[in-house]
Image (cartoon, grey):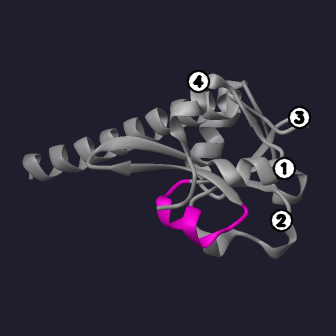
Amino acid sequence: MRILLLAILSALLLSASNTSHQVKILEKVVSEISINKQIIIWSDDKEVIYELKNSNKFLTTKNCQDATLIILKDKKNLLKICNNIHIFALNYKLLSEIPQSFGALFWKKGRPNIVIVEPRIKAQNIKVTNNLRPYLEEKVW
């Protein structure tokens, strides 16, 4: 019984740690882009939006219509009324499935990976700093 409880507790702590680490990476990425508007974030990932809201570095909103940037975890949560908003995906598959998404943060072999698609940021008039240049790709691979 103790082993099961320890395993569950470890899994919960690891999950919370991954979310916190993911949010720190997202904060860095978002702070390195410019969309010619104030960045207001909406996400379908409640843990991400909670962490971003508590960091006080970015404005967040409860509905996607008021957002200027969407951080998307699941395609089914993308509402049709929010289709003209910049989208940053939380998995690589979404980057290829949603043409208006400009980048993604995903985990591969236990490590975070960032991909920003250069033709998409140009088409959406998104500017990135030199810190994000190593993550630019010409296409979704």
The location of residue 100, given as percent across then percent down, is: 73, 63
Observer able to see residue 25: yes
Q: Is residue 81 above or below residue 11?
A: below
Q: Which portion, as a residue range, is magenta?
A: 90-100
Q: Residues within 10 Å of mark 2 (few under 14, many from 20)?
A: some
- The circle on residue 38 is 3
Left or right: residue 15 versus residue 27 is left
- The circle on residue 82 is 2
Calculate the distance from the C-alpha at mark 2 to the C-alpha at mark 4: 29 Å
Q: Nearer the viewer, residue 17 or 29?
A: 29
Amino acid bearing label 2 = Cys
Q: Which residue is mark 1?
A: 67
Calculate the distance from the C-alpha at mark 3 to the C-alpha at mark 4: 20 Å
Q: First in sequence, mark 2 or 4: give its number.
A: 2
Left or right: residue 27 versus residue 122 is left
Q: Secondary structure at mark 3?
A: loop
CB-based contact (under 8 Å), mark 2 and mark 4: no
Q: First in sequence, mark 1 or 3: give its number.
A: 3
Calculate the distance from the C-alpha at mark 3 to the C-alpha at mark 2: 17 Å
Amino acid bearing label 3 = Gln
